[in-house]
Amino acid sequence: MAEYRLEGPKPARMYEVILPKKIGYFGKIQEVLEDLFDEAAIRKIPFVRQSIARNRKQKGFDEDRWVKALCKASRGYSIYEMDGRFLSADGPVDERVIVIRFLFHNPAADGRDDGTDFLSVSLEVVNHLVARRFAQELGVEEEIWFVEYSHPQLSIWRRSSTDPVAGEAPNRGKKP
């Protein structure tokens, strides 16, 4: 049986971006989300350029490290859809929305991280590199919602590094 060790609970931050589900938005959604993993694309975002210009005035600001932290902070996301009824000025509206969920935490101190505090940049990543981009670049919605969940805790059951990967036959006393 595989061995797992418990990490946590540890502080986490969870955000959701909610926007109407429209076929015409799929390309922009893919572009914005893929840009989160591309340092050059992140540097082109107006908010990032403005932040770099403002932060350069601070002693000790490391532009490359800050941009790399933005790029590494969002190690993934989940997308789901939900149906709901929302109140508009014209009355109730039934609408299907896309929800993009982000969960941020700082990796365990086991040599897999460089000490970057991903929680501190998480708000900027989701609010400006995702939600604000959708609002500005889609430019047609009355509202795009951004939700931050307060005080989530994350626990991870992590497979011990000495255990075989699922699906592999265990080495039963044989030399590798």
Image (cartoon, rainbow, N blue to C red):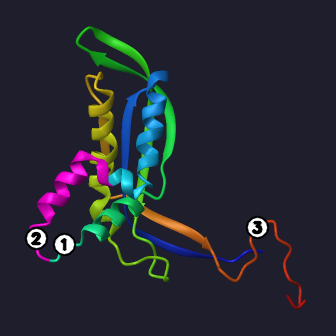
Residue sitting nearer the eye, 26 or 98:
26
Identify the residue at horizontal 46%, vertical 22% (top origin): 24
Disc 1 designates what residue? 61
Name the element at disc 2.
loop
Q: Is residue 143 above or below residue 168?
A: above
Q: Quadrant of the N terminus?
A: bottom right
Alpha-carbon span between mark 3 and mark 2: 48 Å
| Dot 3 and dot 2 residues touching (CB under 8 Å) | no
Identify the residue at horizontal 82%, vertical 70% (top origin): 168
**x and y percentages locating residue 48 in the rendered image:** 24, 53
Q: Quadrant of the C terminus?
A: bottom right
Disc 2 designates what residue? 58
Dot 3 or dot 1: first in sequence order is 1
Quick check: can you spot residue 125? yes
Name the element at disc 1.
loop
Alpha-carbon span between mark 3 and mark 1: 43 Å
Disc 3 designates what residue? 166
Identify the residue at horizontal 53%, vertical 67% (top origin): 156
Q: Residues within 10 Å of mark 1 (few under 14, many from 20)?
A: few
**x and y percentages locating residue 159 in the rendered image:** 64, 73
